[in-house]
Image (spheres, grey):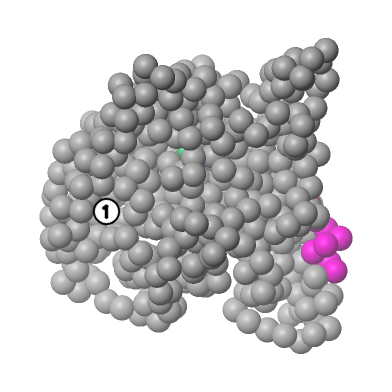
Amino acid sequence: LTATDLVNTSLERIGEIDGTIRAFLKLDEEGARDRAKKLDDSGEFGPLAGLPMGVKDNINTRGVLTTAGSKILDHYTPLYHATVMEKLEKARANMIGKMNMDEFGMGSSNENSGYFETRNPWDPERVPGGSSGGSAAAVASGQVSFALGSDTGGSIRQPAAFCGVVGLKPTYGRVSRFGLIAFASSLDQIGPITRNVEDAAYVLQAIAGHDPLDSTSADVEVPDYLSALKGEVKDLKVAVPAEWMGEGIDPGVREKVEQSLKVLEDLGARVEEVSLPHIDYAVATYYLLAPAEASSNLARYDGVRYGLRVEGETLIDTFSNTRSAGFGEEVKRRIMLGTYALSSGYYDAYYLKAQKVRTLIRRDFENIFNQYDVVVGPTAPTTAFRIGEKTADPLTMYLNDICTIPVSLAGLPAVSVPCGLSGGLPVGLQIVGRPFDEAGVLKVAHAYE
Ligand code: GLN
């Protein structure tokens, strides 16, 4: 099998199915063929060599259109690679194209893409989840071997759950954010979306590690994730937050999670119920902090430096015309929310208060991790919902992230691994670990898988 064969198979599959799924914003057919040919000529190999990969469109790719799903970056072609791209290029993975997403990562269904909706391969009437919906759908439908996503409040894990694939959000700081188009900088992390846990370990191995170009990247040693998979879960202490198994969680989802917990018990793990006392505030906290950071990060799209420009009579008109035309509804809503939360007079009441609650939520997890090795529950409260079902009410859409957001606020690593079907649709099991213990969550996921 050559790298060229792999590209051909991937492109063939894309030709067959992407008319229906619509996972790709941009194909890089020529680039992919060139890279494959070079690789075949060089005869160099490695675990990811030649593997067709999809890259979420908020990750900068040198010479290839990068829009973050937004019209405001319609024509933006980066001059540089994100650090993860440099690393994956060194590992000889082969990018096939850029994956659809909710604009700037703001959404849970891909319906907020500035371009089009991606569909769930299990049922094209349903959403693939979001915001890394294009990445998850492409992996689930066999268009690429693996993909990169990004996760701010669940955007790797929830689409992985909805599409029946594996999605890993690393600890905040584990993977460089250099070249990731910022949504909420204190939460954003890049991670793999793969068909199985072993693949996730390979991809994480390639992208993890300290990067001087990202000041929040952590200088923590990267272990060997592949050998970690061999570990046992016997006597492992598993905590299950009662709040993740009660009201608001679909009975079909709960049943599958309960069955998975039995499997872990059969493997020798000790499963106990715990409580996350401040979890009820997590969604509200996130929807203050994330928009506040976004309102600041998105200030740079002014029609002068990047992408779209809609001229006006004055400079202020140009700013305003560009931003009115370029940003979608959800992005505008969040810029307004965030600007309000940060404005003087409201800062203490909203932003500062939310920061304090974030600390309480982090401590809830710290307390649990004093006694337990992992925290386990559902990834999302439901299976994939119908296209259009939640678009009228942003609050019901926000609530789909109740299980992923607390983990993001605490900065912890978490994987979503498929744990069966409910009503014919995939359910995801979320396994959360101590800071920088990706090896631990991958081990449990692998043992379960
Ligand atoms: N769905 C959440 C939001 O809309 C999380 C998105 C993400 O993780 N990028 O903000």
For the point 46% across and 30% down, the residue is: 292
Residue 10 in the image: x percent, y percent?
73, 61
Locate residue 312: give its quadrant: top right
87 lies above or below 65:
below
Dominant SS of magenta comes to helix
Q: For the N terminus, which image quadrant?
A: bottom right
Locate residue 36: give its quadrant: bottom right
Residue 357 in the image: x percent, y percent?
26, 35
Q: From the viewer's perspective, tell me whether residue 447 is left or right of residue 426.
A: left
For the point 20% across and 36% down, the residue is: 278
For the point 44% across and 58% down, the residue is: 173
| Residue for badge 1 | 376
- Res. 56 visible in picture: no
Q: Secondary structure at mark 1?
A: strand
Whether the magenta-drawn stretch holds residue 31 is answered as yes
Q: For the C terminus, which image quadrant?
A: bottom left
Whether the magenta-drawn stretch holds residue 435 is answered as no
Which stretch did the figure color magenta?
26-34
Q: Residue furthest top?
A: 313
Residue 66 in the image: x percent, y percent?
72, 46
Q: From the viewer's perspective, tell me whether residue 345 is left or right of residue 143.
A: left
Q: From the viewer's perspective, tell me whether residue 426 is left or right of residue 280.
A: right
> Pointer 1: residues within 10 angstroms few (<14), some, or many (20+)?
many
Residue type indicated by callout 1: Val
The one of 373 and 293 positioned closer to us in this rendering: 293
Residue 69 in the image: x percent, y percent?
67, 37
The one of 395 and 366 positioned closer to us in this rendering: 366
